[in-house]
């Protein structure tokens, strides 16, 4: 059985893609707007205050559970601290499968439309890998997100 070549090199998401550039700043702004001290917020989130500082300065990846807790504690709308790319990563499988159903195409045809290997698309749908930011831009353009 002959395998098909990739149309475009698949770039797996790296750590720099997984750390939003402004998410920590948004958490800090939400905390300050709610007039909550750093130590109080850290205690509420059940994390060390230096960990919260690392989050606020975008030094480390912020788990989605922490973001959801900050939104709840600061009484801000759900998903308001997520950027567009990271919201896509949360729902990548649903977005791709919905598009394929709507267009009545296979995942293979979808992979051809965005110009990546079918293995890449399958790994995104199965949540085994994250789409890179560049591939997300291709998907966004195709689907008109």
Image (cartoon, rainbow, N blue to C red):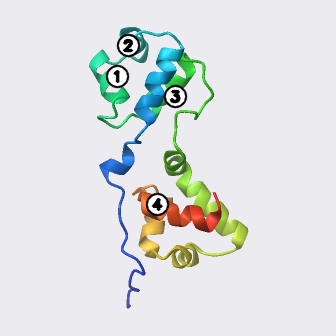
Camera-nearest label, 4 or 3: 3
| Quarter in which the N terminus is drawn | bottom left
x and y percentages locating residue 56 in the rendered image: 37, 27
Q: Is residue 130 at least partly visible in the picture?
A: yes
Tag 2: Cα neighbours inside 10 Å, few (<14), some, or many (≥20)? some
Residue to which mark 4 is pinned: 124
Camera-nearest label, 3 or 2: 2
Question: Closer to the N terminus: mark 4 or mark 1?
Answer: 1
Residue drawn at x 40%, y 34% as measured from the top left: 63
Question: Closer to the N terminus: mark 1 or mark 2?
Answer: 2
Tag 1: Cα neighbours inside 10 Å, few (<14), some, or many (≥20)? many
Residue drawn at x 52%, y 73% as measured from the top left: 114
- Label 3's element? helix
Residue to which mark 1 is pinned: 52
Q: Nearer the viewer, residue 137 or 5?
A: 137
Question: Closer to the N terminus: mark 3 or mark 2?
Answer: 2
x and y percentages locating residue 27 in the rendered image: 46, 26
Q: Nearer the viewer, residue 27 or 131?
A: 27
Relative to 61, residue 53 above or below: above
Quarter location, residue 80:
top right
- Label 2's element? helix
Tag 4: Cα neighbours inside 10 Å, few (<14), some, or many (≥20)? many
Relative to 103, residue 94 above or below: above
Between the residue at mark 4 and the residue at mark 1, the CA separation in whole angstroms equals: 30 Å
x and y percentages locating residue 141 in the rendered image: 59, 65
């Amino acid at each position: 059985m002959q395998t098909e070549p990739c149309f475009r090199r698949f770039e797996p998401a790296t750590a720099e893609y997984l750390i939003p550039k402004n998410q920590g700043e948004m958490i800090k702004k939400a905390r300050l707007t709610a007039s909550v001290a750093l130590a109080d917020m850290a205690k509420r989130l059940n994390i060390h205050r230096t960990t919260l500082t690392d989050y606020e300065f975008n030094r480390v990846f912020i788990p989605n559970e922490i973001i959801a807790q900050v939104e709840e504690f600061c009484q801000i709308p759900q998903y308001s601290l997520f950027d567009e790319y990271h919201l896509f990563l949360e729902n990548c499988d649903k977005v791709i499968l919905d598009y394929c159903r709507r267009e009545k195409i296979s995942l293979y045809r979808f992979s051809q439309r965005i110009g990546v290997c079918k293995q890449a698309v399958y790994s995104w749908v199965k949540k085994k890998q994250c789409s890179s930011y560049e591939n997300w831009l291709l998907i966004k353009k195709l689907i008109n997100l």
